[in-house]
Amino acid sequence: MPLRSTLRPLIALAMVAASSIAALAQQTSPSRVRGTIESVDGQTLMVKSRSGEEVKLTMAGDIRVVGIVKIALADIKVGSFIGTTTVPGPDGGNNAVEVHVFPEDMRGTGEGSRPYDLRPNSSMTNATVAESVVGNDGHTLLIKYKDGEKKVVVGPDTPVVTYVPAGKPDLKPGAKVIAFMKKLPDGSFETNRISVGRDGLTPPM
């Protein structure tokens, strides 16, 4: 049998396997929904996303809930471990859309820089503040992570927040949340981690 005829079914089989793996990864990979809790019924949350879609979420048994509260720009110190969403500025720099300061017990969470889905062309960088320079238009931070560093401009109106303890009682109608979710084989969605704004705050990340 010609080699080409022998390889053709193997290539077809490989393509089917690859597409099946991709479909499975898409089905089980976690994603985020940002929105407002509309109702709570036992372990089920109904969340209206910022784009207007209604998403039904089942809370996992090991769900982790953290609160988000506003802090001052001056609370970002050299040595702070932060996360920041940035977009390219007109001068080619990195302008912060938001900054969240991690408490010490969350230091090292997601360290590095990667594309992010908050805005077009945005990225998320979790890193340690190495330098902080105060200017007329806010702070310029030099942040360093294990694979590199980045200069970030934080304006005076940029939301700055931190994490505080929270629990399921904070998940009530009207609360603004970011829920990390995954699609289960039956098509439903499950969440095991939710960030909830305290005192009406909308988590900015």
Image (tube, rainbow, N blue to C red):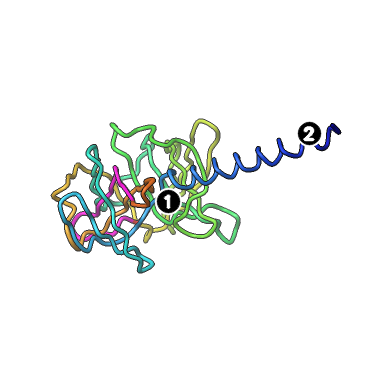
Taking the spot 78% from the left edge, 33% from the top edge, the residue there is 6
176, 106: nearer the viewer: 176
Count residues near mark 2 (Cα–Cα under 10 Å), then give few for <14, some for 14-19, many for 20+: few
| 41 in relation to 12, above or below | below
Residue 47 lies, in percent from the top left, at: 28, 60
Left/right of residue 4 with respect to residue 17 in the rendered view: right
Horizontal and vertical percent position of residue 97: 43, 56
Write down the quadrant of residue 129 in the picture.
top left
Q: CA distance from mark 2 to mark 1?
A: 64 Å
Is residue 143 shown left or right of residue 5? Answer: left
* Frontmost residue, 71 versus 74: 71
Stretch of the chain drawn in magenta: 189-203
Q: Residue at x 42, y 48 (%)?
A: 84
Q: Quadrant of the N terminus?
A: top right
- Give the residue drawn at x 71%, y 35%: 10
Nearest the viewer among 141 and 109 is 109
- Residue under numbered circle 1: 139
> Which dot marks residue 6?
2
Residue at the left extreme of this rendering = 169
